Amino acid sequence: MYFPHRIRSDNFRGAIMRAPLFATACVASLEAASAATLVGYAVLPADTFSPGPTSGQFIGRANGRTPPFLDRQPVQGVSAIDRGPVPGSWIVMPDNGFGAQDNSADVVLRLYGVKPDWSSGHVYPVDIRTGDVLPDFGPRSFIDLSDPNRLLRSPLQADLDR
């Protein structure tokens, strides 16, 4: 459905008439979503790390974990997901690390390849290019993101290491 970002007087009435239809569609989709049933799940443990520069230097001890995490980067905390190279695999991007930019300056922004097993509940690392299951989150399971042209407002750790 098209909703113009600027409403001119000649199409204002049409936009007003479409609003109830849009609201009805939203309610209908909510009703359908409430009928969903969880049929499986998979968990990536909080203590999942990949090789990389030491992380956690700007956070305190919490949840029984004592930072810093020497020569390791956190994998958990997924905030973005897309289809992976083979069916059943996914490319995921963790969030900014430890909850805020101020305490996450030593976290490298990465994309990881994963394959959840919905029946066992495990999440397996996969080669980010081929989808082959790997024994751990090693270098073949991720791609470091960088911003060498400084298009982002904040520097990325991967750019600071160069």
Image: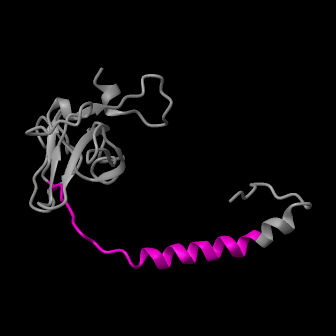
Residue at 91% across, 61% down:
9
Quarter of the picture containing the N terminus is bottom right
In percent of width and height, residue 105 lies at 31, 40
Quarter assignment of residue 126: top left
Magenta stretch?
18-46
Q: Is residue 21 magenta?
A: yes
- 107 or 78: nearer the eye? 78
Q: Residue at x 26, y 40 (%)?
A: 112
x, y percent for residue 25: 60, 72
Image position, residue 17 (x, y; %) = 79, 72
Colour theme: one colour
Camera-side residue of 40 and 67:
40
> To which quarter of the image does residue 133 belong?
top left
- Is residue 141 rendered to the left or right of residue 157? left
- Name of the residue lying farthest toward the right: 10
84 or 104, which is in the foreground?
84
Residue 33 is inside the magenta segment = yes
Quadrant occupied by the C terminus:
top left
Residue in the picture at 48% in, 34% down: 152
Q: Which picture quadrant has residue 131?
A: top left
Indicate left or right for 29 with 72 as reference: right
In the figure, 69 relative to 144: above or below? below
The location of residue 6, given as percent across then percent down, is 79, 55
Q: Is residue 32 above or below residue 103?
A: below
